[in-house]
Image (spheres, rainbow, N blue to C red):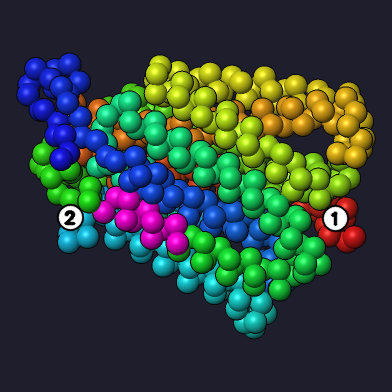
């Protein structure tokens, strides 16, 4: 039987309930797969510039500008979706309908983008691409907003919430390590480049994998996504557009977390960008296949770092874990930059276990681990801030909170991706794709 929050005025005054609503560990682990499902789609879309420029025939700068400009569309859709979630309370609950709808919308749009965009008449390809990409953004907003906001109904135990990060970061680490191997050591060599066959297999794999993970995430939140878990004992203040601005203005912890999350997200996006990896391993080091091998070597150490980081968060708090992991990122990546600047990157190879190879491997492993902790520990802090707003004002607005962070994530991700595309795509084509 679930524990229920005691909302006695004395407890409200101290902002700390005497008991907590908890979830089973497997439910938290299953729901965390919702973020992995959207990460899979996001990973696919980091390659959309290759498809749009190399196959559809659109200009590199034009595609980069369009992706960046689409954030204006996010500025319109995010608050609408957030408010829509906050007003929803049906037979399927508040979050499940948006998780399912988000997956369906993203699936349809990516299939149309990658399977049909190059087949439509040349004079309408740009319009077709922009329209489908805009619809994809709506679906992505649906599902990513639920990742942040759905945790409010799963548990409000401060010791249990970081468990979400333990699962989420472990999934993320395994996914990106596996994805790197899949792309660089299997898919790209199999099809001889980023051609139509490459994208056909890539897209179908993404759709099937994300569908399975979305199903498991929906099952994980199923028993908790019900009216009595919304707000204070099921009582919800009506939320409007005016309330969203009031929340942004009056919630200082929210403002500070947005700043911290945005700066960390920018660094994480650049570090994970597919073009950066192609440049680092394919151009600077001169061996793109090393990327997949390196990812395999970093998998287990990264998981160990994640376990240590999230355990630290459960003991001393998520805020402290975010600060420590962010400083660790700055130190490690500064050291990695100095190593590549002063040393000879072309000597890095597992067939040549020199000082450069060992130092690069150690720093790459540490950097991958601590940046994953820094990026993922933010998510459990969002429901904490949602609860703070509920106790402070009576407004239960998980959708608004979730879409604020969805908007920040997508805005920063797009900025990082577009800038890498703008400055590096030409170099990548010259050095890698022409081989």
Secondary element under disc 1, as helix, strand or loop, is helix
Task: Say which quarter of the image contains residue 55.
Answer: bottom right
Nearer-the-camera pick, 126 or 154: 154
Q: Position of residue 403 (x, y in %)?
A: 37, 46
Q: Residue at x 46, y 31 (%)?
A: 377
Q: Residue at x 33, y 26 (%)?
A: 159
Label 1: few (<14), some (14–19) or many (≥20) C-alpha neighbours in 10 Å: some
Q: Residue at x 27, y 39 (%)?
A: 23
Secondary element under disc 2, as helix, strand or loop, is loop
Q: Residue at x 14, y 31 (%)?
A: 5
Res. 129 in view: no
Q: Position of residue 153 (x, y in %)?
A: 24, 42
Q: Position of residue 244 (x, y in %)?
A: 27, 40
Q: Earlier in the sequence, mark 1 or mark 2?
A: 2
Indicate whether residue 125 is drawn in magenta.
Answer: no
Task: Say which quarter of the image contains residue 407.
Answer: top left
Pointer 1 residue: 432
Q: Which residues are magenta?
A: 212-222
> Residue 153's mark?
none
Pointer 2 residue: 89
């Amino acid at each position: 039987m679930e524990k229920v929050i005691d909302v006695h005025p004395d407890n409200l005054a101290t902002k700390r309930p005497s008991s907590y609503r908890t979830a089973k560990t497997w439910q938290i682990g299953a729901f965390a797969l919702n973020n992995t499902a959207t990460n899979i789609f996001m990973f696919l879309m980091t390659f959309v510039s290759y498809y749009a420029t190399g196959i559809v025939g659109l200009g590199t700068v034009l595609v980069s500008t369009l992706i960046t400009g689409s954030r204006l569309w996010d500025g319109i859709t995010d608050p609408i979706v957030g408010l829509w979630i906050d007003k929803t309370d049906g037979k399927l609950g508040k979050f499940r309908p948006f998780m399912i709808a988000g997956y369906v919308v993203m699936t349809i749009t990516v299939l149309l983008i990658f399977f049909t965009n190059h087949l439509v008449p040349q004079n309408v390809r740009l319009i077709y691409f922009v329209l489908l990409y805009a619809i994809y953004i709506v679906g992505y907003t649906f599902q990513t907003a639920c990742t942040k906001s759905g945790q409010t109904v799963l548990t409000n135990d401060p010791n249990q919430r970081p468990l979400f990060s333990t699962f989420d970061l472990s999934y993320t680490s395994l996914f990106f390590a596996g994805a790197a191997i899949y792309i660089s050591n299997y898919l790209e060599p199999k099809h001889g480049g980023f051609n139509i066959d490459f994208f056909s297999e890539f897209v179908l794999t993404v759709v099937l994998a994300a569908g399975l993970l979305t199903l498991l995430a929906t099952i994980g939140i199923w028993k908790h996504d019900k009216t009595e878990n919304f707000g204070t004992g099921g009582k919800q203040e009506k939320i409007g557009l005016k309330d969203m601005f009031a929340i942004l203005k009056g919630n200082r912890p929210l403002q500070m977390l947005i700043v911290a999350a945005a700066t960390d997200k920018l660094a994480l996006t650049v570090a994970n960008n597919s073009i950066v990896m192609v440049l680092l391993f394919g151009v600077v080091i001169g061996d793109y296949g090393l990327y997949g091998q390196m990812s395999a070597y970093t998998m287990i150490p990264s998981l160990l770092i994640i376990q240590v980081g999230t355990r630290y968060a459960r003991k001393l708090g998520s805020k402290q874990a975010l600060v420590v992991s962010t400083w660790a990122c700055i130190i490690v990546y500064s050291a990695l930059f100095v190593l590549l600047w002063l040393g000879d990157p072309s000597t890095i190879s597992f067939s040549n276990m020199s000082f450069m190879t060992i130092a690069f491997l150690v720093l790459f492993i540490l950097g991958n681990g601590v940046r994953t902790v820094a990026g993922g520990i933010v998510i459990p802090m969002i429901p904490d801030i949602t609860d703070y707003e509920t106790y402070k004002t009576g407004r239960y607005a998980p959708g608004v909170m979730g879409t604020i962070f969805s908007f920040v994530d997508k805005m920063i991700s797009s900025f990082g991706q577009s800038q890498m595309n703008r400055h590096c795509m030409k170099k990548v084509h010259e050095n890698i794709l022409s081989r």
